[in-house]
């Protein structure tokens, strides 16, 4: 075939480490201070003409040779076949959810991060107890005068010992502060998250919503009323597919990271995510994954 009729091969631009595809943004700054999209000029600064050999990835932060970013279709097919196919599918699923929420520059570069085969959960019974306690707390926030009865109920049902120290303080505090009540009112989100894990909620509401009263009302209908006997209910707890739970945890972990990074890089929030809801879910699911470490509900680690 003569060279002039050879079709120019289409190249896809992609990071070799995490597979991020540049979004056309001006993410790269030259030592001269110029800010531009380096893929428009093959790594050459339009202002001072410096040719940059390496290009830093906005998603994973790794620098790789600029030339390596240009992939053929064959390269991509080969990459798809690399690595554990189950973990690769998890990577794609998680990343597409982030992209749908408007978090476009977050990729998983380390596949084992998605592997949870050897992890253990809290027992379903303990998760059920926690769900009830969180529900009781959020109920008490709006019905302060009922707290003595709620304490008596949790004691009679033998789950008072699972109430955290902060929660006990709240139940016993004659006049809890306004900001404490505000804080505790978020506990219904944590209860709802556990309810989803324990199949009491079909679907977790989108992270973009402001109010989920409808979902919370449906959830309440699946719970025993405050004061009811809990033995039978708590002996029938079971988890939904743990892969779904892990994915939800990682999703909210990466959302938390996104908001944390916004604090440092000063960029605009490009999502409609309610960060408080996401943070509650992240915290709750981290707690769920601390089997045998007996992590205190009051001190859950959410560093990422
Ligand atoms: Zn990367
Ligand atoms: Zn320059």
Image: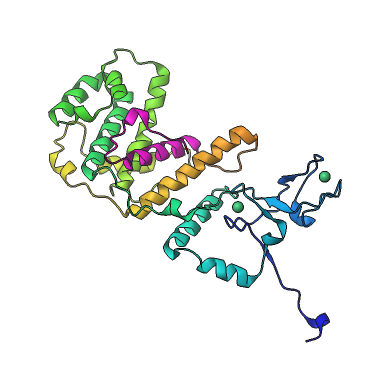
Farthest residue, direction bottom: 1
Compared to residue 96, the image places residue 277 above or below, namely above
The answer, for residue 47, to whether it is visible in the render is yes
- Which residue does the image show at 39% across and 47% down from the upper left? 204
Colouring used for the render: rainbow
Compared to residue 243, the image places residue 148 above or below, namely above
Q: Where on the picture, by quarter, is residue 157? A: top left
x and y percent of residue 175 in the render?
A: 33, 13
The answer, for residue 212, to whether it is visible in the render is no
Q: Nearer the viewer, residue 181 or 106?
A: 106
Residue 254 located left or right of residue 189: right
Farthest residue, direction right: 48
Q: Where on the picture, by quarter, is residue 294? A: top left
- Which residue does the image show at 48% across and 63% down from the upper left? 83
Q: Which of the image's four quarters has the N terminus?
A: bottom right
Farthest residue, direction top: 174
Residue 54 located left or right of residue 59: right
x and y percent of residue 176 in the render?
A: 35, 16
Q: Is residue 293 magenta?
A: yes
Residue 131 located left or right of residue 99: left
Q: Nearer the viewer, residue 70 or 226?
A: 70
Q: Nearer the viewer, residue 246 or 142?
A: 246
x and y percent of residue 304 in the render?
A: 48, 39
Q: Specify start and end residues of the magenta stretch as a single range.
A: 274-303
Q: Is residue 76 magenta?
A: no
Residue 262 located left or right of residue 188: right
């Amino acid at each position: 075939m003569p060279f002039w009729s050879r079709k120019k091969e289409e190249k896809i631009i992609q990071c070799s480490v995490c597979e991020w595809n540049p979004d056309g943004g001006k993410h790269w700054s030259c030592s001269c201070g110029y800010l531009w999209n380096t893929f428009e000029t093959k790594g050459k600064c339009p202002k001072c003409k410096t040719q940059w050999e390496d290009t830093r990835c906005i998603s994973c932060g790794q620098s790789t040779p600029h030339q390596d970013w240009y992939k053929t279709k064959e390269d991509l097919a080969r990459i798809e076949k690399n690595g554990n196919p189950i973990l690769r599918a998890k990577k794609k699923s998680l990343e597409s959810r982030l992209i749908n929420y408007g978090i476009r520059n977050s990729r998983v570069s380390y596949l084992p991060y998605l592997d949870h085969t050897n992890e253990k959960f809290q027992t379903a019974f303990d998760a059920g107890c926690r769900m009830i306690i969180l529900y009781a707390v959020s109920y008490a926030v709006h019905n302060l005068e009922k707290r003595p009865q709620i304490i008596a109920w949790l004691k009679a049902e033998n789950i008072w010992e699972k109430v955290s120290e902060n929660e006990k303080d709240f139940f016993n505090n004659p006049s809890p502060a306004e900001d404490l009540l505000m804080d505790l009112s978020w506990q219904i989100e944590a209860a709802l998250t556990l309810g989803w894990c324990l199949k009491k909620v079909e679907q977790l509401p989108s992270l973009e919503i402001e109010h989920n009263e409808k979902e919370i009302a449906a959830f309440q209908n699946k719970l025993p009323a405050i004061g009811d006997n809990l033995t039978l209910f708590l002996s029938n707890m079971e988890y939904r597919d743990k892969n779904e739970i892990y994915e939800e945890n990682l999703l909210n972990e990466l959302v938390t990271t996104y908001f944390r990074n916004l604090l440092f890089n000063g960029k605009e929030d490009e999502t409609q995510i309610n960060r408080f809801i996401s943070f509650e879910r992240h915290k709750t699911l981290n707690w769920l994954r601390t089997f045998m470490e007996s992590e205190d509900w009051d001190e859950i680690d959410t560093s990422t």
